[in-house]
Image: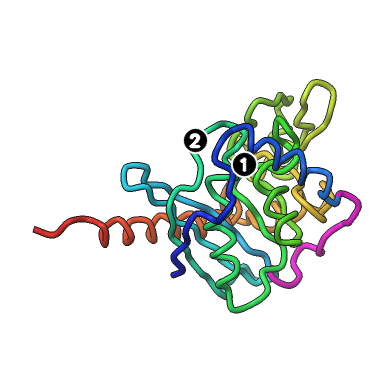
Amino acid sequence: MTTVGVPAGWPATEEEARAVQDELRGRVVLDEPGPPPGTGHVTGVDVAYDDDRDLVAAAAVVLDAATLHVVAEATAVGRISFPYVPGLLAFREIPTVRAALDALPCAPGLVVCDGYGLAHPRRFGLAAHLGVLTGLPTIGVAKNPFTFTYDEPGSARGSSTPLLAGTEEVGRALRTRDGVKPVFVSVGHRVSLGNALAHTLALTPEFRLPETTRRADALCRRTLQEAAMRQAPTS
């Protein structure tokens, strides 16, 4: 496990954070298809918080894309680096997520974020932000549609409908299990939307959420619990 401090010069206000988003948003690459599903590595990242203790834990779990077996994993724990502000959550998560990614013993391949990429009010969610900073291909697979609208997809696995900001398509609502609530897929960096959907289906052979997200979620929660226990006073 890596211990992370708040990076020097990290935005401290909403105004500063939005300025960073404006600066980096133009660097998002949208004209690359990304790695083919079922090849190489695919990595899930997720975070868990303990606001009372000012702790955030991140996990990165690398899977073999063909078998979905775990290849490697790494964790990081640090201070919460930004207050909770909708639309600016990446600034709470990126320092520890990057530290976890950097601690991996192998290349992560495609990175799957539990959140948003272009499906973001400023078109620069965590997946886009992380992709620009690391240069890695990234996608976002979220549990809810945030502020966007969509028509219900067909009931069969693989059905999808546009996720819309007005008339602009920012992602897709994708059914990963027959008759189960869809997930919400958006591109982050260096991946096409069609490829992002294909990866999401390849990562959901049994459950609604991608195996990458499920495994990273469990690991970051466990890591946070262990870190909180180390901080707890002893009697």
- Dot 1: element: strand
From the top left corner, tell me how far across and down residue 153 is, in percent. 73, 32
Of label 1 and label 2, which has the lower sequence position?
2
* Residue 103: quadrant of the picture: bottom right
**Range of magenta residues:** 30-41
Look at the picture and state if 138 lies above or below 115.
below
Please give the label number shown on residue 142. 1
225 drawn magenta:
no
Read off the residue under disc 2: 84
Q: Amino acid at mark 2?
A: Tyr
Q: Is 138 or 211 nearer to us in this picture?
A: 138
Q: Amino acid at mark 1?
A: Ala
- Dot 2: element: loop
**Residue positioned 77% across, 62% down in the render:** 37
From the top left corner, tell me how far across and down residue 162 is, in percent. 79, 32
Would you say 7 lies left or right of 190 here?
Answer: left
Which quadrant, please, contains the C terminus? bottom left
